[in-house]
Amino acid sequence: MLTIVWARGGIVTSIERTAYPRFKRLITAHELHLFFAPTREEAAWAAERMDSDGHQLALLLALKSYQRMGWIPKPDEYPEMVVDFVRRAVEMPEGTVPLWATGRTAERQRTEVRRWLGATYDQAAARRIAGGVDPERGHGEEPSGRPDQHRAGEGRGAGLELATFSTLDAMASTIRKEVNAAICAGIHDRMNAVQRAGLLRLLEERDEDGTTQYNRVKKQAQAPSWSHFKRLVTQLDWVDALGDSSVWMDGVASRKITDFAGEADASELKAYAQ
C-alpha cells in the first residue's frame, strides 16, 4: 500500500515510504544468491545477444531485477553490491562495468528481457488493473490508491510489467480525491438544510476574541477544575445542538474521520457544506 505523507497544500508520497518494489538498502548474501544469481541458461542467453562483457552484464542485471521487482530500473538505480555479485556469478573479469545501451538499442534490450520472461509491456492494461477500486470498500476507507502492490501484483500475475511508481502515485492521488469527494457528498446529503446552514454560520459568526465559531469547535478541555468542567458541559451542549454527527458520519471509517479532522480548515469545511 502506498504510504502517504500529509503536507500543507497537498499530499506528498515518497517511494522510500511505500511498498513499491525496489532495491533494499541492505541486501543479504542469501537474497543475492536467491534472487540475483543468473542461471547457466540466462548467462548463455545474454552471451548470444551481446558481444561484450559490459553489455552482457547490463542485460543480466536488467533480467534479474525484472524477475525480482517486475520492472527494469534505470542504470543509476542498481546497487554496487548487486552489480558486483552478478559480475562474479558469471565469472566476468574484475573491473567489468555494465554498459547501458541508449535509444532504440536500449528498448530492444528491454524487449528481449520481457520476451525471455514471457512478460508483456502494456502500461494501459497495467494501469487499468492497478486502478481498480472496490466501491464498497471505498465508501468509508482511505483509498490509498488501490494502485497499491495488491493491485499491481494482479498485473504481474497477468504477465504485465509493473506500472512505474510515478504512474501509480498519480493514480492513487486521483482516486483518493474521488473517494474523499464521495464521502463528503454523503455527509452533506445526510444533513438537513438547517444543519448545513448552521455549519456555514460557524465560518461567519465571530466570538468576542474575533475568531470564528468554527475555531470554538476545536477547543480542547482545560485543566481539571469545577469552573472548567462547567465550561466544558456548556461547550458540549453547544456542539450537540449543531446536529447528530453520528448520523452524518454513518458508514465512514474511523481513520477517515481522524484524517478529515486533522486536515480540515475553514475553507475546506465551507466547500464541503455548500
Image: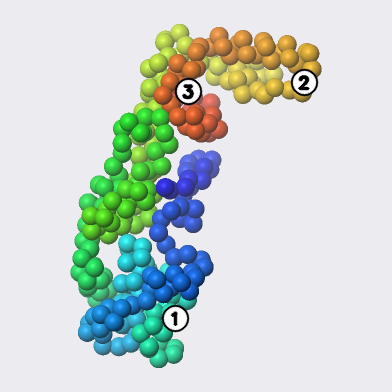
Instruction: Name the residue at 53% across, 12% down.
Output: 242
Q: Which mark is residue 71?
A: none
Q: Earlier in the sequence, mark 2 or mark 1?
A: 1
Of pointers 3 and 1, the one earlier in the residue sequence: 1
x and y percent of residue 101 in the render?
A: 30, 77
The relative height of residue 62 versus residue 205 in the rendered view (above or below) is below
Q: Residue furthest bottom?
A: 93
- Which residue is disc 3 drawn over? 270
Counting residues from the N terminus, which is met first, the one under dot 2 or under dot 3?
2
Q: Taking 88 as reference, is 257 left or right?
A: right
Image x and y of residue 236, in percent: 62, 13
Mark 1: which amino acid? Asp
Q: Quadrant of residue 172?
A: top left
Q: Which residue is mark 2?
A: 224
Q: Secondary structure at mark 2?
A: loop
Q: Secondary structure at mark 3?
A: helix
Q: CA distance from mark 3 to mark 1?
A: 58 Å
Residue with the mark numbered 1: 84
How far is disc 2 from disc 3 in space, using C-alphas? Answer: 33 Å
Q: Residue 180: x and y, percent? A: 40, 32
> Residue sitting at 30 percent across and 44 percent down?
131
